[in-house]
Structure formats: C-alpha cells, structure tokens
Amino acid sequence: MNIEKKAMYKQMGISEEVYEFSEKIWNSLSDRFAQIDAVSEYNQLKVIGAMQKNRVSEACLLGTTGYGYNDLGRDTLEAVYADIFHTENALVRPQITCGTHALALALMSNLRPGDELLSPVGKPYDTLEEVIGIRESKGSLKEYGISYRQVDLLPDGSFDFEGIARAINGKTKLVTIQRSKGYQTRPTLSVERIEELITFIKERKPDVICMVDNCYGEFTEAREPSDVGADLVVGSLIKNPGGGLAPIGGYLAGKKECIENAAYRLTSPGLGKEVGASLQVLNSFYQGLFLAPSVTANALKSAIFAANIYERLGFAVVPDSVESRHDIIQAVTFGDPEGVIAFCQGIQQAAAVDGHVTPEPWDMPGYDSPVIMAAGAFVSGSSIELSADGPIKPPYAVYFQGGLTWQHGKFGIMKTLQKLVEKGIVSADFSRFM
Ligand SMILES: *Cc1c(COP(=O)(O)O)cnc(C)c1O
C-alpha cells in the first residue's frame, strides 16, 4: 500500500523528499493524535446523547417557511445545543449571519444604556471593535451609551487579576472573554483558565454576565466554557459546530434570560423565539453538528502536523509542536512575503473546489496591508474547511486552520511545503532535519 500511496502523492504533485519527510513527521505524532481522538470520541457521544435525549426524528430535519411558527426541527435543535453546552437555553438560527453577528446580538441584547462591558483578556477580535465602538461605527454599543473597559493580559500571557479587580465597578454588567487567540499572538485560553477567570470575577460581582466568544474552540476539549461558569457561549456555524455542512448560522447557548433577551432582539419584542423559519437548512445543521467533534479533531490534527513540519524546518510556530491545543488556528512565521504567498498557494492547490485558482495578495477593505487568502471551500468563507491567510507585513506570518478531513489537511500542508521547495524558500534536502 505504501508504494501505491507514494505514487498517488507523486501524481498529485508531491515529490519523494516532501513525502518521506512528511511521513516521518506524521509517524511521530501517534500519541498526540490518540489524545485528540479520545476527546473527539467523548464529544461524539455527548452529541449523540443530546440528540437521543431530545428525540431527534426524521421530521426534525424538515424545514418551515414564512413565519416559522411551531418549527419542530428548529426548537428541537436548540434543545440539543442547550444539552451539549449544559445550558438552560439556546438560540441556533440561520438568521444569525456569522460569528460577529452572534456576538453583537449577545452584547446588544444583554446590555442597556449606562451599562459597562469589560474585556479582561485584552483587545477582542477585530470585527468586535466596531460592534463595541473602539473604532467609531454606526450602531455601535458606544452610540447607545454603553461604555467599555479593557484589561490587557500581562506580558507573559497571564491574567492581570489586580487590574481586573480594579476595573469591575457598579456599572459592569457583562464580561466578554475570547477563548481563541484569533489572529493575535497571545495564548488561547483553555477551559481550565477560563474557569479560573470566571471564578475570580464572580467572587467580586456574582450577578455579572460572563460571556465567552467560543469561536474556533468548540469540541477541542471535553468541557466547554459553559461547564465552568460562563453564562453565555457564542459562536459561528461556519466554524467548528457546523461540522463543515452548515451553510450559514450562529448560535448562543446560556442562561434562560440571556437567551430570551437575544431572541427578542434577533426577531422582535413580543415574538422572540416563536418566529424564524428554518427554510431548508436544518438537515445540514443537525448532520454538521453530528460530524463536528470528528471534523474538529481533523482540523486539530492538521494544525499539529503543520506545527511539527514547520518547527522542524526552523520556522516559528504558534502554538508550538508540543503545546496543548484549545483552538484550531496555527500560525507559522516565515519572515518574508514569499513564504506567506507560497504557503497560501499550496493550501489552495490542495483544494477540491477552486484548486486551479492561484491566490494573490490584494488590498482588502478594512486591512492596513495587502492580504492573501487561500480558500477552496464548499461553503464560501468557511474556516472550518482547510484555509489560510496572511497579511503581507512583518513578521510575515500565515494563519492556517481547518480541514474537514485529516487526509486533506495533511495533503494541504504537504502542498505548502512542496511550493516552498519549488520556490527555493526551503531546501529539498530534508535529511539534516530528520
Ligand atoms: C471568526 C471569529 C469571530 C467572528 O466570526 P465571523 O463569522 O468571521 O464574523 C469572532 N471571534 C473569534 C475569536 C473568531 O475566531
């Protein structure tokens, strides 16, 4: 079989050197992969258990139109999410257009004029700057008289407990905690660290709402932030919990009151969760959720493989080759634009959709430097699918994530290495790294 496999890789443009080096790295990862499989096995049972408990039936997979009253599938799916996250309630809708929308909804529905929002983990994800009003924006929380306070992490990545204690005041109504590092260099927060932070905050102000931006973190661990005191967890369905199948959508899971507030904001006061037709998406929401633990594991394996390949070749990688993982994002620093471009082109060349396209850096609105993006996705923009992007500016790092199957993730990373070799950025003689 190995001979056939090697021949197939060759047919797909992978040289013998890249193949042998990749096999060597892969063979060294069996213990890591076994740990990931154990988490995914646990989470698979958690998902099936929640579906069985809520008696998911064939009828749930059908959708409604118009107002969407009595949408059995939608209401059951929300109960399933609530069980998975161990929360009182959940809101899971195609009318929530993306992760930013889900987070904005959670904030805008649970904060009132005069309240204050606190981020104790530093600057939130870029798109939230406009939601909050850190960057002036129409319709921001700031425009509605909601103030914002931020406490940065300490230089070593730990929580600034003194600063947080000082920042909590009579107005503090909601604390937002971003689990994933996103596109920053700080470490991603484990559920254990989130627990430590929430416990500290609740000791000082028990009635504050602790919300976690759960994007990219779902199913990477056995526990979710809602298992350790978060009142609200929020995320996107075109990331982990959609399992690659959901074509749109976002979710909120949490305390009954927080979810009701969000529902009345999403639709209308008086209507709340009662309306919102699910159209034809429920089948993909259910099946995607069913696949999500496994898909997340595949993305984690792909990220770990990438970290090990590129660390071995001498590039800086975050997280490093052995660190524990709490999200699916992998950063690799190349130190020059050509490396970023070659990496992204390699990912693109591995895609099943748009594999023939060559990505180039372009001036994307909202960014202060050209950005290159590789995404050959079945769902446009889906970042649980194999994807990479990098701003063309120092330190010339690329951010890589996803991979619906581990085999695709592995092939994608091999393609990136092949591209780097072809462009002369990496020497084809790997013997000194093996
Ligand atoms: C992706 C992401 C968001 C925003 O989600 P979009 O679907 O891109 O709007 C917010 N926070 C984090 C940490 C993310 O990774």
Image (tube, rainbow, N blue to C red):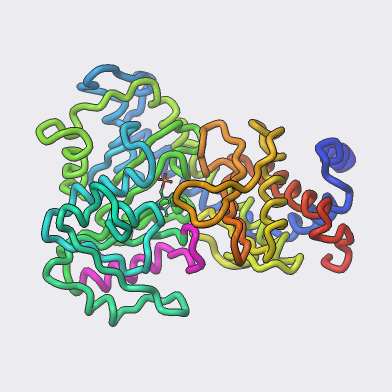
**The magenta stretch spans residue 16:** no
- Quarter of the figure with the N terminus: top right
The residue nearer to you, when weighing 423 against 150, is: 423
As drawn, 215 above or below 158: above
Residue drawn at (48%, 53%), measured in percent from left and top? 367
Q: Which residues are magenta?
A: 182-203
Quarter assignment of residue 348: top right
Quarter assignment of residue 352: top right
Can residue 412 be seen here? The reply is yes
The residue nearer to you, when weighing 35 against 297, is: 297
Residue drawn at (38%, 52%), measured in percent from left and top? 127
Q: How many marks?
A: 0
Quarter assignment of residue 359: top right
Residue drawn at (58%, 57%), measured in percent from left and top? 330
Can residue 87 be seen here? The reply is no
**The magenta stretch spans residue 197:** yes
Q: Position of residue 425 (x, y in %)?
A: 79, 59
For this view, does 61 lie left or right of residue 252?
right
Q: Position of residue 125 (x, y in %)?
A: 40, 57
Q: Position of residue 300 (x, y in %)?
A: 58, 52
For this view, does 118 lie left or right of residue 60?
left
The residue nearer to you, when weighing 199 against 264, is: 264
Name the residue at the bottom extreme. Answer: 162
- Quarter of the figure with the C terminus: bottom right
Residue drawn at (30%, 45%), measured in percent from left and top? 252
Q: Position of residue 307 (x, y in %)?
A: 66, 61
